[in-house]
């Protein structure tokens, strides 16, 4: 245990001492927040305004009073979508950046020094995972605070204390998932160039695969929609989005949104997921994500054991 704690402390210190690596990890979510607010905000707003017009038309056809939607509610919906999209992506992509310490130690020969030392291989593997998780959590919580501040500045806060706590739990769970995934990938990488290439691919593609950039329900192909439902990150995005928008949905109901419209909005932004026609409850999403984390950590441990046995032979 003492060796594990010492190695973990060492990895975290190396991460924070490398200013380029640390600030690139820290600034990535902030840049994403600016880009999302600049480009995606208008797309999300147009989509929500279109849903409002459909609801107003439905009420007019039924002879019901037409709902009046405050601008603050529209801004709150857009801000919560941006909030959830950024966290869903950064919790995973930042993990690939903070986990570069493992690759750097291989390149610099530090890993070889550890191997010939009395330190257990299991302690080494677990220390890299733990240090990467703690480092990524620091960046993820910084990004979460920045998002909360953004919503406060916009003046459209609808989240309760329970919603905030659930979002924090989602961030921890999704960050653990990202760390476990990056740890498995990094086992096979031996150069900084390979690590940077993988990080670039993950940063560019993960947001689309998990439904952060575009809701999965917006894809025209039903086959693609069902295929993406096999990816755990999809459920992480939906959980954060559900908790970020829970207060907004409650406000929509209070101003008179019809149930049909509410269901359409929730499905359209992936707050309500369907797996081959069956609705996926939130507890199932948690079960899938937690199970995936346990499975990935198990694979990471197994890979290190097999790699150790191969070297002995």
Image: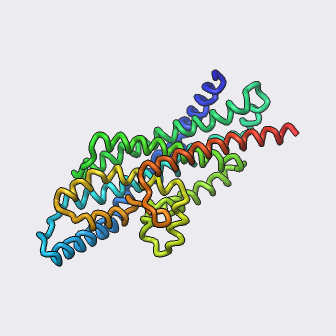
Furthest-right residue in view? Answer: 313
Locate residue 308 relative to residue 270 in the image: left or right.
right
Locate residue 107 relative to residue 7 in the image: left or right.
right
Q: Which of 279 and 85 is in front in this view?
A: 279
Q: Where is residue 131 in the image (x, y as percent from the top left)?
A: 57, 35
Residue under the image location 68 percent in, 40 percent down: 301
Q: In which quarter of the image is residue 200?
A: bottom right
Furthest-bottom residue in view? Answer: 61
Residue under the image location 31 percent in, 41 percent down: 162
Q: Nearer the viewer, residue 161 or 109?
A: 161
Q: Nearer the viewer, residue 189 or 13?
A: 189
Q: Examine the rendering and report whether any part of residue 313 can be seen.
A: yes
Vertical order, 52 against 279 (above or below): below
Q: Position of residue 269 (x, y in %)?
A: 37, 63
Q: Position of residue 36 (x, y in %)?
A: 38, 60
> How is the rendered protein coloured?
rainbow
Vertical order, 36 against 185 (above or below): below
Residue under the image location 36 percent in, 43 percent down: 145
Residue under the image location 62 percent in, 42 percent down: 297
Q: Examine the rendering and report whether any part of residue 20 can be seen.
A: no
Q: Position of residue 132 (x, y in %)?
A: 57, 39
Furthest-front residue in view? Answer: 278
Furthest-top residue in view? Answer: 2
The quarter of the image holding the N terminus is top right
The quarter of the image holding the C terminus is top right
Q: Quadrant of residue 231?
A: bottom right
Q: What count of labels does the image hold?
A: 0
Q: Nearer the viewer, residue 167 or 213?
A: 167
């Amino acid at each position: 245990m003492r060796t594990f704690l010492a190695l973990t402390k060492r990895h975290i210190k190396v991460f924070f001492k490398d200013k380029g690596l640390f600030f690139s990890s820290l600034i990535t979510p902030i840049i994403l927040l600016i880009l999302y607010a600049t480009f995606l905000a208008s797309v999300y707003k147009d989509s929500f305004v279109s849903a409002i017009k459909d609801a107003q038309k439905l009420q007019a056809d039924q002879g019901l009073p037409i709902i009046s939607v405050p601008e603050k509610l529209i801004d709150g919906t857009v801000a919560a979508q941006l909030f959830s999209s950024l966290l869903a992506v950064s919790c995973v992509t930042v993990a690939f950046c903070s986990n570069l310490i493992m690759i750097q130690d291989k390149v610099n020969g530090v890993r070889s020094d550890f191997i010939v030392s009395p330190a257990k291989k299991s302690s080494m593997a677990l220390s890299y995972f733990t240090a990467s998780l703690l480092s990524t959590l620091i960046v993820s919580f910084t990004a979460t605070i920045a998002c909360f501040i953004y919503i406060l500045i916009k003046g459209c806060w609808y989240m309760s204390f329970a919603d905030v706590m659930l979002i924090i739990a989602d961030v921890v769970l999704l960050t653990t998932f990202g760390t476990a995934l990056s740890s498995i990938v990094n086992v096979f990488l031996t150069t900084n160039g390979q690590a940077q290439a993988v990080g670039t691919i993950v940063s560019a593609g993960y947001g689309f695969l998990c439904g952060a950039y575009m809701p999965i329900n917006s894809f025209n192909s039903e086959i693609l929609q069902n295929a993406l439902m096999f990816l755990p990150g999809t459920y992480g995005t939906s959980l954060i989005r559900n908790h970020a928008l829970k207060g907004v949905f409650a406000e929509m109901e209070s101003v008179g949104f019809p149930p049909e419209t509410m269901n359409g909005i929730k499905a359209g932004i992936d707050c309500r997921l369907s797996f081959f026609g069956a609705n996926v409850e939130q507890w199932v999403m948690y079960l899938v994500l937690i199970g995936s984390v346990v499975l990935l950590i198990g694979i990471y441990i197994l890979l290190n054991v097999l790699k150790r046995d191969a070297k002995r032979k």
